[in-house]
Amino acid sequence: MKWTKSEIKQLEEIYESEEYSKSAVIQHFRRSWGSIEGKALKLGLNRPRGKRTKQLKNYPPLSECQIQLIEGSLLGDGWMSKHGHGKNSSFAKEQTSRSREYLEWHYQVLQPYSSNIHDRKERVMNWGNRVTKTQSCHFYTCNHFVFNEMRDKWYPNNKKVIPKNLKLSPLALATWHCDDGSNDAKTRRIFLNTQGFTFDECEYLIDLLQCQMGIASSINKNRKKPTIYISMKSYSDFIEIVKPHIIVDCMQYKCTELDYAFNEKQYTKEYRPWTNEETVKSICKMYHEGYTVKDLSLRFDMNNSVISNILKGKTYKNIDRPTIDIHHLRSTSGHPGVGWCKRSNKWRATTTQNGKNKYLGLFKQKEDAISAVNEFQSSGEIL
């Protein structure tokens, strides 16, 4: 790409100035350093050298706040690397463009090691049925020996692992949550996306959350990869810990908590305010009269799973009730083998024969589907 007259004029002003670092010059012209340096040599420009190197040697060691920020980022989206055959390491992080303020906060905290924040080119992803366009920002620090110890601890074999002597702090937990956490304020659930770690490492992180932060959590699977789920009982405690350390506006949604009156009794087996002996018996009686699980859930203001467990006898075992066929609970019609097909808006009749499912057809009336199943079962076929 040819240099314009305005770019040449800007190069003459910027290249010999000590106020602009090498990365700042690259970001300004959006060209490689080799192209910039080659043009400067043709113009007879001389760039002052050695001052930046002398300053790096006099930089203070990392503060406790900076260490906690980097460790929280390494649990999330951050990484550390050594460029080429260099001896020193650097820290980097990437976020979407709408989270640029979040990276600018990193830039301020990690001073004087912060180098630059630049925008990457827009990436177009084709998912088959849709096309998405994303643009991200990239933050990185300078190469310095203060990062070497931390990189050796997190990358012993050039692969990121969880160090055994890791100590979580509120700032590190908040940074981790901003990177990989998801906050569902309506259902009071928090997930930490840890698919990049092994199940053993996630178990270790769960122990750290419980022992050091007092946060109860468990492992969930997402496409055969581990994720950490913060239990509902620890939701408020988790938000209370991380909220003071999330100061940027673009990440406030991560610590939003809706008004909710938590009643611990509701999550114990001894306390079920919505049921008693009369309610359980009436549920069973109405089910035998022809009410479906969905009808009962609407009538008694309960979830379908609660109604099903009552009918199956999994809960309130001390209450006498008539026995119920479990297969009836799986169908929307209340009859085994008959269910509603949303795609065709008809009743589907199915049964089993020799351990295999057998399709009997679609019917406009539920009674026709039930009679088709009954006729097939009474025809002498082996079910």
Image: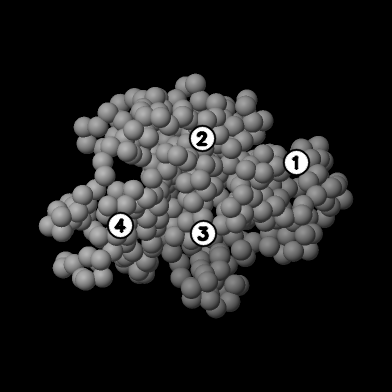
Q: Pick whichever of labels 1 and 4 is earlier in the sequence.
A: 4
Instruction: In the displayed orientation, state which residue is furthest to the bottom.
Output: 364
User: In this image, 114 relative to 101: left or right?
Assistant: left
Q: Pick whichever of labels 2 and 4 is earlier in the sequence.
A: 4
User: In this image, 271 relative to 370: left or right?
Assistant: right
What SS does tag 2 mark?
helix
Q: Against 113, is 25 above or below?
A: below
Label 3 belongs to which residue?
377
Instruction: In the displayed orientation, state which residue is furthest to the top.
Output: 165
What SS does tag 4 mark?
helix
What SS does tag 3 mark?
helix
Which numbered tag is attached to residue 66? 2
Label 1 belongs to which residue?
267
Q: The N terminus is located in which quarter?
A: bottom left
Q: Amino acid at mark 2?
A: Gln
Q: CA distance from mark 3 to mark 4?
A: 88 Å
Where is residue 269 drawn, in percent x and y?
76, 38
Q: Pick whichever of labels 1 and 3 is earlier in the sequence.
A: 1
Q: Against 349, is 60 above or below?
A: above
Label 4 belongs to which residue?
14
Q: Amino acid at mark 3?
A: Gln
> Residue 300 or 241: which is nearer the viewer?
241
Between disc 3 and disc 4, the foreground one is 4
Label tally: 4
Between disc 3 and disc 2, the foreground one is 2
Where is residue 72 drawn, in percent x and y?
51, 37
The residue under the point 56% across, 64% down is 338
Q: CA distance from mark 3 to mark 2?
A: 72 Å
